[in-house]
Image (cartoon, helix red, strand yellow):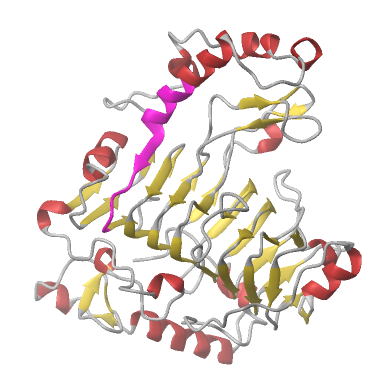
Amino acid sequence: MASASSRTSHRRSLRKRRALVVTAAAVAAGVGAGVLVMNANAGAVDLYHQVLPAKDGWAASGSGTTGGAKADAAHTFTVSTRAQLVKALGSQTDTTPRIIKIKGTIDANTNDSGKKLTCADYASGTGYSLSAYLKAFDPATYGKKAPSGTQETARKAAADKQKKNIVFRVPSNTTIVGVPGTKAGITGGSLQVSNVKNVIIRNLTFADTQDCFPQWDPTDGSSGKWNSNYDSVTLRGATNVWADHNTFTDAPTFDKTEKTYFGRKYQVHDGALDITNGSDLVTVERNQFLNHDKTMLIGSSDTDSTGKLRVTIHHNVWKGIVQRAPLARIGQIHLYNNVYETTTVNGYAPKYSIDSRAKAQVVAERNVWKLPAGAKVAKLLSGDGTGSIAGKGNLVNGTETDLVAAYNSANSKKIKTTVNWTPTLTAGLQTSVKNLLTDLTNLTGTSAAGAGLLS
């Protein structure tokens, strides 16, 4: 049970973020439906009109992040099916503020009539089959050159059919929120926030985003790899985005259940939440990242946009995560008050938590790691010798630990310990984190992390 001082600290934190709960009498007065809250700089608003509080991470920069808070009734939607979601999103070029309430779980692999679609449905008519693909590109006979020819063309055609069905393109000035108490979320789909701005994504579970048609790349590494597309949420060239109280998971299709071809795991999952291609001013808070391999990529390459990729990641839970929590390139990234449970879960064996490379400027402070017996602190970090990680107050099994010193003592490519910036947008930063693991994983109340907790 959390201490009295911890509970008091959280009450103060919540007051700063949402100020107070307004009584049901306000509903009768016509303010709005549902539980109402008071934002620091606004009047009483319901869950769907809430905006990012002041100083809550990089997404509070500039004009802040308000999503669709100004939406009128004609642009406020409640959706329960894939077809309804597509219609509510409208054109990606339409910047009219909109609020989309997702009620229940939307299966992205369904057609406009709601019929379930399988990988075989997408492949139908393209000429693709996995068995033919494996025969065509077996390294023993095809060699290690990039796949081309009839089966690769067919694979691309099948992949295009799936892409058109499961990718949801989000326009600027949009809020997407899960309706409380409905197990709201998207299964098998990919929200793409591409070259737009001012987007809010909250209270949703993103599950099992699968690529039916991974590509074999024999040139990827020494032994080749199966590479898939489709992150559960993708930010590309996006600005001012707030992702809050969501859950990301591969469940129920865990990687350990996939077969091995050409000596490599047939990987159908890509990223959980990737932030790339010059995306900027992003706050990722109070989410759960569960049962996943390559979880969060910041920066698409070592030459991604300098001066952008400014991201705040706080009060998230990472459990059953193999790597990239996050992998950071180039940008100014602030990680605080996150919890990392580094045990093997459902076959997902941790490699590292944070990777700083390509001159990334990471500040990681007052985070908590729970390590199993025998695990080495030196393996919590990774890097290429050009990235930096500064910060203090990080706990490993309850003891304050210098993570960079532990890593550098065991590796030749050293992580730098100085950065060229100082975080100032730090709303809710807790300096005492001894109870953080319990508080974030208690699965009740808005002080915890994950979907289904907002009301």
Locate residue 270 relative to residue 369 in the image: left or right: left
What residue is drawn where x is 45% and y is 65%? 282
Locate residue 145 relative to residue 379 in the image: left or right: left
What residue is drawn where x is 60% and y is 32%? 268
Query: Which quadrant, please, contains the C terminus?
Result: bottom left
Q: Position of residue 118 (x, y in %)?
A: 46, 21
Q: State the image quarter where residue 330 is shown.
A: bottom right
Q: Position of residue 375 (x, y in %)?
A: 85, 61
Looking at the picture, tell me which residue is in the foreground, 251 or 350.
350
Query: Which quadrant, please, contains the N terminus?
Result: bottom right
What residue is drawn where x is 18% and y is 65%? 70
The number of callouts visible is 0
Residue 326 visible in the displayed image: no
Q: Tell me if residue 223 comes above or below residue 397 in the rendering.
A: above
Residue 240 part of the magenta-drawn span: no
Locate residue 415 relative to residue 321 in the image: left or right: right
Q: Position of residue 139 (x, y in %)?
A: 77, 17
Locate residue 390 relative to residue 84 in the image: left or right: right
What residue is drawn where x is 54% and y is 49%? 272
Looking at the picture, tell me which residue is in the foreground, 411 or 365.
411
Q: Tell me if residue 218 comes above or below residue 358 in the rendering.
A: above
Q: Tell me if residue 199 comes above or below residue 170 in the rendering.
A: below
Residue 162 part of the magenta-drawn span: yes
Q: Position of residue 62 (x, y in %)?
A: 35, 74
Q: State the image quarter where residue 335 is shown.
A: bottom right
Q: Tell me if residue 442 comes above or below residue 215 in the rendering.
A: below
Residue 278 visible in the displayed image: yes
Q: Which residues are magenta?
A: 158-173
